[in-house]
Amino acid sequence: MTLGIGILTHEYACLVSDRRTTGVGLPPNDEFDKTCVLETRDARVALSFSGLASARQYDSKVRLIENLRACASPDYLLFGVLKRMTDILNADFLTNRHIRQISPCLRKFSLLVMGFRQQWEIDRPVVGLISNYQDFEENNSVEIPWREFRPFVADLPVQRPSHGSVI
């Protein structure tokens, strides 16, 4: 499973993930990129995924880039993009034959989003998670992924938070 660590303050955002992928019967790949950057009309964020990297001809990194392009319009706003990305991930994971052929416990996937969103000409820190096995609000994970992806996205409050979360 991927190590994904995010640090978000009102001054900076940092998102780090490992590059290793493993698979049943396959040698580890230490050069698989699990991160990308997204710029919308109202935000600049880094994204990193954990969980299913590939399943036969399904490549999560390639699909992530394709899906980001597909779900940008019509508004090109971060919250809209993430909502549409959730819908696309639900469709992919329910209908893609390469994903459906693997064990349900191997279908875990999370997309961590971290960066800044402009509100009233002020850059506000924003964090998001789209996952079929991690609940950001409850701070827990399940062994067998849910059938659907659940989105979470929020601006960091102006006051300093008293806790954090790691996926």
Image: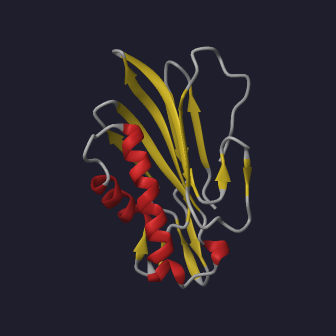
Q: Looking at the image, can residue 31 be seen? A: no
For residue 104, what is the image quadrant?
A: bottom right
Q: Please state the horizontal and vertical placement of residue 90, each as a whole percent of the image.
A: 48, 64
Residue located 57% across and 15% down the image: 158
Residue located 65% across and 66% down the image: 145
Residue in the foreground of this view, choosing between 45 and 35: 45
Residue in the foreground of this view, choosing between 55 and 74: 74
Q: Determine whether 21 is above or below 140 in the image.
A: below
Q: Please state the horizontal and vertical placement of residue 48, each as a whole percent of the image.
A: 49, 49
Residue located 46% across and 62% down the image: 89
Q: Work out which residue is located at the far left of the displayed protein and give it.
A: 74
**In which quadrant is the N terminus drawn?**
bottom right
- Report the number of numbered marks: 0
Q: Please state the horizontal and vertical placement of residue 44, each as a whole percent of the image.
A: 36, 33
Q: Please state the horizontal and vertical placement of residue 9, each as a whole percent of the image.
A: 56, 23
Q: Determine whether 68 is above or below 27 in the image.
A: above
Residue located 66% across and 53% down the image: 134
Q: Looking at the image, can residue 70 be seen? A: yes
Q: How is the image coloured?
A: secondary structure
Q: Is residue 152 left or right of residue 68?
A: right
Q: Determine whether 158 is above or below 92 in the image.
A: above
